[in-house]
Image: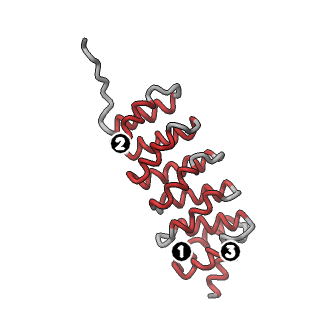
């Protein structure tokens, strides 16, 4: 376990290059590194939490529930790392927390949460539709964007409604979503 201890020292050294090398070594150790990384998640140092979340996020063996609590971390960079990790580790249990993350004051967190919702695919459609009607514009834009990228026919009414919004971004993502669904043609009643 000397190797593990040395890698953890490197990971928390404050030197980005050394930490990146340590991440690769920790990933090579696989599950043997998980208890130490999960312990590091409890650190009061946001940089240590960031490296732990980032390392766990890169492991194909990581569990979604290890990352979820960090979507509400006090540090925006840690929240970003958690949201990015959830892009690689989609799971329906993450959807409610990712929906909440769309309201995050940090725009990178909201963008990454949107990507993670898209990674969850059709399971995210109904929760996304639920937040569109009573959310601030920035949240609605991210929700419509996710719906456009998921390409589920249940989103058509919301996408059509978004075309009427007084927001270029809402209109853009609504048009994009409808086009991806093959509904980008305009039909005119010839009366």
**Residue projecting furthest to the left:** 190
| Dot placed on the residue nearer the N-terminal end, 3 or 1 | 3
How many numbered discs sit on the rendered protein? 3
The quarter of the displayed image where residue 174 is located: top left
Sequence-wise first label, 1 or 2: 1
Compare residues 20 and 144 and report the one nearer the observer.
144
Residue 162 x %, y %: 45, 31
The residue that mark 1 highlights is: 27
| Residue plotted at (67% across, 59% down) | 73
Give the left or right position of residue 188, taking residue 157 as reference. left
**Spatial separation of the CA atoms under disc 1 and disc 2:** 40 Å
| Colour scheme in use | secondary structure
Residue at figure coordinates x 54%, y 38% from the top left: 134
Residue 173 position in % (x across, y down): 45, 35
Q: Pointer 3: what residue?
A: 10
Q: Do the residues labelled 1 and 2 touch (CB within 8 Å)?
A: no
Q: Do the residues bearing badges 3 and 1 touch, measured as CB atoms within 8 Å?
A: no
User: In the figure, 30 relative to 158: above or below?
Assistant: below
Look at the image and tell me in which quarter the C terminus lies: top left
Neighbour class for label 2 at 10 Å: few (<14), some, many (≥20)?
A: few
Q: Quick one: 8 or 31, which is closer to the camera?
A: 31
* Above/below status of 10 relative to 85: below
Mark 3 secondary-structure assignment: helix
Give me the residue at 64% from left, 57% from top.
Answer: 72
Q: Mark 2 points at which residue?
A: 154
Bin the neighbour count of mark 3 within 10 Å (Cα to Cα): few under 14, some 14-19, many 20 and up. some
Disc assigned to residue 83:
none
Residue 176 locus on image (x, y percent):
40, 35
Q: Nearer the viewer, residue 91 or 47?
A: 91
Mark 2 element type: helix
Residue 1 rendering spot, x and y as whole percentages? 62, 88
């Amino acid at each position: 376990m000397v190797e593990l201890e040395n890698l953890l020292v490197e990971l928390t050294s404050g030197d980005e290059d050394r930490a990146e090398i340590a991440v690769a070594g920790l990933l090579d150790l696989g599950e043997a590194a998980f208890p130490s990384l999960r312990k590091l998640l409890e650190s009061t140092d946001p940089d240590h939490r960031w490296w732990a979340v980032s390392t766990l996020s890169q492991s194909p063996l990581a569990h979604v529930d290890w990352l979820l609590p960090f979507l509400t971390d006090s540090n925006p960079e840690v929240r970003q790392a958690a949201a990015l990790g959830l892009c690689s580790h989609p799971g329906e249990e993450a959807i409610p927390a990712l929906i909440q993350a769309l309201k995050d004051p940090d725009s990178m967190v909201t963008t990454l949460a949107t990507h993670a919702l898209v990674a969850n695919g059709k399971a995210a459609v109904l929760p996304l539709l639920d937040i569109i009607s009573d959310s601030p514009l920035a949240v609605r834009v991210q929700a419509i964007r996710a719906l456009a990228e998921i390409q589920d026919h249940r989103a058509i009414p919301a996408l059509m409604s978004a075309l009427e919004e007084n927001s270029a971004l809402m209109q853009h993502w609504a048009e994009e979503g409808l086009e991806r669904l093959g509904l980008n043609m305009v039909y005119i009643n010839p009366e």
